[in-house]
Structures are given as structure tokens and as C-alpha cells.
Amino acid sequence: MYIAMLEPNEQERVVRGLRDWQFQRKHGSLYDRGSADSHYGRMPNPHYGGVGGDSGPRIEVYDESSVAEYLAGYEYNERYGDKKDYR
């Protein structure tokens, strides 16, 4: 997905998130957990970690920038991603 395909305000949110040191798509990151929660049909619950490997313990987040990063992953998967097929 190209950033140019997003609306200007969405582009700004993505760029702001990319500037944050924690914006990574690695396993367990805020963005990753948001997209995974969407993929598996779970309600949004901002957090990172807690998925094994080197992701560390699950940490709930409440600050605005962390919640925005988590929601960026969640919203991206809602709009462009796929959903787990439980059939």
C-alpha cells in the first residue's frame, strides 16, 4: 500500500507514527498488535508485547501517541487487510 493512496490527514498520522521510535512493524509492536487484533476479529485494546518470543510482556498503553500507533495498525487492517477465516 502506498502512502500516496491515503487521505492527507491519514498520511500525516502515518508519517507522525514513523517518526516515533517505537513505530515498528516487528512482532509485538504497537502497530503489529493493532493489525493482529483486527485480523483476528478482536475489539481494539491498545497494547504491545505479550505474544511470545522477544516481544516481552503484554503492556497496556494509554498515552495518546501509543494509542494512535496501535489504532493505525488496527485501522489499516480493517481497511486493507484480511480477516481470520474461522470456517
Image: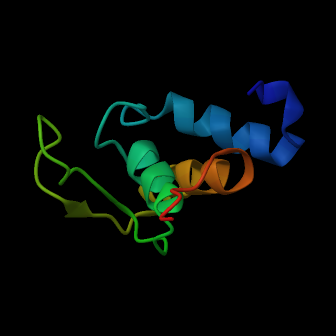
- Viewer-closest of 39 and 17: 39
Q: How is the image coloured?
A: rainbow
**Residue 65 can be seen in this image:** no
Q: Is residue 43 left or right of residue 26?
A: right
Q: Is residue 35 left or right of residue 48?
A: right
Residue 27 vertical position relative to residue 62 in the rendered view, above or below: above
Q: Residue at x 59, y 50 (%)?
A: 72
Does residue 57 lie above or below 31 as drawn?
A: below
Residue 53 at x, y percent in the picture: 11, 37
Do we see residue 43 in this rendering? yes
Q: Is residue 7 left or right of residue 65?
A: right
Q: Is residue 64 above or below residue 10?
A: below
The residue shown at (66%, 57%) is 78
- Residue displayed at 52% across by 29% down: 19
* Residue at horizontal 51 percent and vertical 65 percent from the top: 87
Of residues 14 and 42, the one drawn nearer to the viewer in this rendering:
42
Q: Where is the N terminus found, in terms of image quarters?
A: top right
Q: Position of residue 30 (x, y in %)?
A: 39, 48
Give x and y (percent) for residue 69: 50, 49
Residue 37: image location, x then y, percent = 44, 60
In the displayed structure, would residue 61 be above or below residue 39?
below
Q: Is residue 52 left or right of residue 44?
A: left
